[in-house]
Amino acid sequence: MKNILLPTDFSKNSKNAIEYSLKLFEGETVTFHILNSQKPTGYMTADVLYGAAGDSVYDGILNDNKKELEKLIRYCETQSEGENFTFVPKIDFDNIVDAVNQAVSLNNIELIIMGTNGATGAEEVVFGSNTLKLIRKANCPVLAIPEGYVYNKIESVLLSVNSQYELKTDGLAVVLDIIRKHDATLKILNIEENNVEVDPPNGNNFDQLKDINIERFCIRKIPSAVAIDAFTQLIPVQLHAMFVERKSLLDRFIYGSETSKISYSSKVPLLIFRK
């Protein structure tokens, strides 16, 4: 049985990510933990401490969120009739990262699925602030679903890599499981932004995966964001995965280099793994 975490703020974007999740795991036994978290503000904290019992802003928000969660779960059950799915509601008055990491630890979560859009700041044009926080700090792989993206049968999965990092199948169980389930092709794209010879990533043991169809590609002297965008325009994929070790590499993939000023605008779901 799989345990999947679905953070939600009850927005259209988060609901779309949940709908994608139901399609992605059709035919499997899955427990979906649907989490709504809200960090208490100073006003709310004061109200909880000094307000009358049963009449606080906290109680009001808690009751409202419970009702919204119940409504959302009823919708999910209707959309997934006949599936072996279980939906577990969760409410946490904490910041999104702490709430998610607690849920991951307590419920053996193997994947977080959420929407991408949610902020309009200069740093967060493509990814909302909560999505960025979880991509960088969650103790679990994060699958970010672009705003308005409708589930398409997964036939090809892109894995972006860089030869300076050791690449092994260890830790990629989630994406390999998806590939096997959908009998998809794995396209490994090695990106070298500098003018260097491109060799297979160190420690690559993908050749041991005899049951998976693997195609290899390499691009040199092009910023990561541009390379990925060009590749996905020429070769359609339904899922993009990347394995990152540090914030700077992640930023280059998402925002591009400082000189190019080009953001990586994900047109397909983006699966982030961290070491």
Image (tube, rainbow, N blue to C red):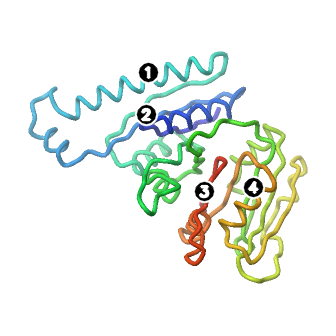
Task: Verify CB contact (< 8 Å) between mark 2 and mark 3.
Answer: no
The answer for how far apart the CA atoms under marks 2 and 1 are is: 10 Å
Front disc: 2 or 4:
4
Q: Which residue is mark 1?
A: 71
Q: Quadrant of residue 50?
A: top left
Numbered tag placed on residue 265 in the rendering = 3
Residue at x 31% of width, y 41% of height: 93
Secondary structure at numbered mark 2: loop
From the top left corner, tell me how far across and down residue 232 is, in percent.
Answer: 75, 55
Q: Which mark is residue 232?
A: 4
Q: Which residue is mark 2?
A: 10
Q: CA distance from mark 2 to mark 4?
A: 31 Å
Numbered badge on residue 124? none
* Mark 1: amino acid: Lys
| In this picture, residue 133 sits left or right of residue 232 | left
Between label 1 and label 3, give the one nearer the viewer.
3
Q: Which residue occupies 66% across, 21% down?
A: 83
Residues at circles 1 and 4 in contact by the CB criterion of under 8 Å = no
Crowding at dot 2, Cα within 10 Å, few <14 / some 14-19 / many 20+, comes out as few
CA separation, marks 2 and 3?
23 Å
Q: Nearer the viewer, residue 55 or 203?
A: 55
Q: CA distance from mark 1 to mark 3?
A: 32 Å
Closer to the chain start, of discs 3 and 4, is: 4
Which secondary structure, mark 1?
helix
Amino acid on which the number 3 mark rests in the picture: Ser
